[in-house]
Amino acid sequence: MQDRDEPSFDPRTWGSSRPAATQDASFDVRRWGRGPTPPPPPPIRREPIDPRLRGYGIALGTGAVLALAGAVIAFANRSTHPVAPRAEASAALPAAPVATSSRRTLVLAGAAEIEDTLRSGGIVPAEASEAARQARAALGTAPGEIRLIFDLHGEPGSAQLDSLEATRADGAGLVLRRAADGSFDAKKLAAALKTRVTVVRGELDSNSFYSSAVTAGVTDSLISDFANAFSFDFDMQREVAPGDIFEAGFEQAYNPAGEAVGVPRLVYVSLRTAAKSRALYRFTPPGEREAGWFDGNGLSTIRSLMRTPVDSARITSRFGMREHPILGYQKMHRGTDFAAPTGTPIYASGSATVEFSGPKGANGNFVRLRHDNGWQTLYLHMNRILPGVTAGAHVSQGQQIGEVGTTGRSTGPHLHYEVHIDGQPVDPMTIPTGTGKTLEGKALAAFRKERDRIDQQRAATSN
Ligand SMILES: [Zn+2]
């Protein structure tokens, strides 16, 4: 039993084995365990060129290439992406019957640039204007880069368009092809994103979970998702240690050019410590709006209560008998004390109705919640209670209800947290928090399908 303050524990060093005395006590959640220089994200793998583009004749005259190279380079420099070298293989093709014919591949800042681009490329103005009009109509007015590929033949300034493809990042857009009668055949392209799950595995190093995850290739933005996925299963500060094995699977959408579109999404996490092992899949049950985490059997991770109501705090006093730091005699400590800087968020550990909210003598600013199963949780000494957390209000699990402070009878900023079952205080750190619900019927079938899809992709990327 720990009745006295432990040495300072730095929340930024999950799983750290460094001596606490060397650590900075200041708290900044944005810097949890962040190493000095995280390595760059893993390279994006390229996919083959959109098969829809195959079969477009490429006939390239050397003269046209030289004449227009300057224009192409100028466009390329304006773009944030390098121009894909789709035309390079064509140099080896035999000379085409038409003397001057070439293909351009460009990335434009928006659809409004298409017409000027075609004109600068040498297309006769009336044709440039008509093709651009059709492309803009298909692409819509939303902002975003446009990939433009076009084939032309003829002299600069009076060249004719043979074909054109204008697409957004997701592959949606338009293809124009010159028909026999001289008009354009237009074909709309639907978005053609493919998703792929990438799996990274790693071992917890002696610095932090953050640096271990970055080293393993977990995208920066997904690391807090990873920790949150385990919020009911592991105490990420006290139950992980160097050598523990983790795995993260994230899904990313790719467009036909093989470029990543949108943000990656964590879909699988696993963690193996000396004590236990958990593997979880993200799944949105039919009819529900939010995704949750489920084990391989479809059992939800969500419990009646979270493990701890405050992030990144150190436990300075546990449940049980102790010498009271102010009153100086043996007294039952009815809860757990979490030390954290003033202002650190305090969360409702389960969904509940607020029974009491406000200042109350030695408790300071104090909130008592009554949970759906009849249990109560108590939060003492808050710096402030959040607006709306008033008697009778409903709060959801994980919702912030206040801030750590040192109001009432308290020696420093901390949260005194109690759990009462049948009106009796119990040790918050050892109570069984119950199990979540298990998916059934159609929801379970849908979950198994998603689980198998993720597992297949995991198997495909294992090495
Ligand atoms: Zn206490």
Image (cartoon, helix red, strand yellow):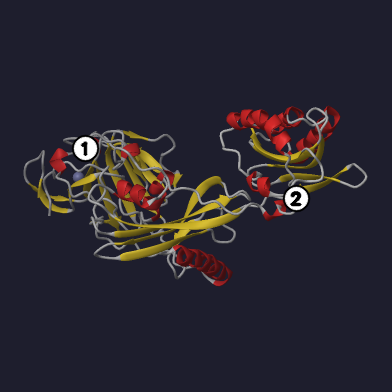
Identify the residue under disc 1.
Answer: 362
Circle 1 SS class: helix
Please say whether residue 334 is visible from this viewpoint: yes
Identify the residue under disc 2.
Answer: 56
Q: Residue furthest left?
A: 329
Q: Quadrant of residue 229?
A: bottom left
Query: CA–CA distance between discs 2 and 1?
Result: 80 Å
In the rendered view, tell whether residue 225 sits above or below residue 387.
below
- Residue nearest the observer in this picture, 125 or 138: 125
In the rendered view, tell whether residue 412 sits above or below residue 224.
above
- Residue nearest the observer in this picture, 93 or 180: 93
Under mark 2, the amino acid is Tyr
User: In the rendered structure, are the residues bearing label 2 and label 1 in contact, judged by CB atoms less than 8 Å apart?
Assistant: no
- Residue nearest the observer in this picture, 60 or 44: 60
Is 299 left, or right, of 160 in this rendering?
left
- Residue nearest the observer in this picture, 258 or 316: 258
